Image: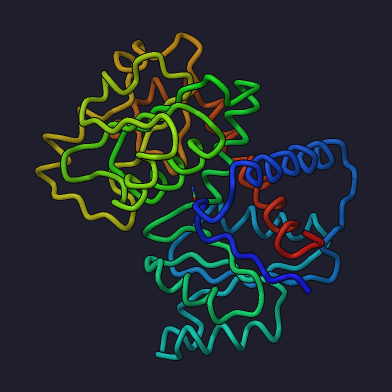
Amino acid sequence: MSEKRDFLTLMDYTGEELNELLNMADQLKYEQKNAMEHPRLKGKTLGMIFRQHSTRTRVSFEAGMYQLGGLAMFLSARDLQMERGEPVQDTARVLSGYLDGLMVRTDCHEDAVTLAEYAAVPVINGMTDYAHPCQALGDLMTIREYKRTFKGKKLCYIGPGNNVANSLIVGTLKVGMEVSAACPKGYAPAGEVLQWAAGAGSFTLTEDPETAILDADVVCAGVWDASFQKIPEETRKKVFPNYQVNGILIGKAKPDAIVLHSLPAHRGEEITEEMFEAHAGEIFQEAENRLHGQKAILLKLLGEG
Ligand code: CP
């Protein structure tokens, strides 16, 4: 029997594996759009532990498991004994006896790692304070749909270096894109991501959004106030506005640049209303692709591999 795989960070996957997941996601999207049933996880169950709010992650995993012929169970952390002190290690071992897979959203990445260590079933990161690999996979799928290839394409992330940035930088570099990030002073992506990125291809980090965005094919607007980062009011008012994706800044990217946003969006903060609506096509396609990308992950981890 092969060893179980988890999906905690994109660091654990090769560029080739990411491309395989994207190919599977494209196939699953085609089948869904053409009303072709694909119950490849018939009889399988996924437990979804949520410690934070969610619209996209919860609904797309639940719908995805249903479309694959399986069952997804929403488990609010608030209602689990875990919240009253039952160790993550014990929760992992108990749930492994009932379920075929686990998805977790938590503000403590270490808890997700512990869950995966003790669970006998695959664990998928549905967002932690450190990483959001499912979001990055949906982003990669959207980039490939719009740009056809990753080769020779440049992605620019603008905003604080948060969990979304950590995963996006790793994912885009792994598939061979050129990557730049413009982050405010004191809000760089995680140190280990930067250390890895330095030797992983073409990556630049700057505090200057105008430099970072030059000739970008894809621009990603990073939210200023991800639930895990508490930004002081003074910084939000004085520093962060320089990192707003607006018409002037986008004018320095390639004319056919697409704009991505992980959502929920805060119009007038990380992106203007005008830019959000001008690029709503890409942004909502990106949100939809969460479904297809996650179904590919579920098939790889819970299916035949
Ligand atoms: N982008 C994202 O993860 O959305 P939710 O918080 O709604 O799941």
In the image, farthest residue toward the front: 199
| Relative horizontal placement of residue 113, taking residue 35 as reference (left or right) | left
Picture coordinates of residue 221, whole percent (x, y): 38, 33
> Which of the 4 image quarters holds residue 188?
top left
Instruction: Give the residue at x 44% y 69%.
Output: 51
Vertical side of 5 occupied by 32: above or below:
above
Picture coordinates of residue 270, whole percent (x, y): 31, 34
- Please state, as top left, top right, bottom left or bottom right, where the C terminus lies in the image: bottom right
Q: Nearer the viewer, residue 277 or 235?
A: 235
Picture coordinates of residue 97, whole percent (x, y): 69, 86
> Which of the 4 image quarters holds residue 281?
top right
Q: Nearer the viewer, residue 177 or 289?
A: 177
| Relative horizontal placement of residue 52, taking residue 229 as reference (left or right) | right
| Relative horizontal placement of residue 294, taking residue 81 as reference (left or right) | right
| Relative horizontal placement of residue 144, taking residue 257 as reference (left or right) | right
Vertical side of 99 occupied by 71: above or below:
above
Q: Nearer the viewer, residue 230 or 252?
A: 252
Instruction: Give the residue at x 70% y 62%.
Output: 301
- Please state, as top left, top right, bottom left or bottom right, where the N terminus lies in the image: bottom right
Vertical side of 13 occupied by 81: above or below:
below
Instruction: Give the residue at x 54% y 71%.
Output: 49
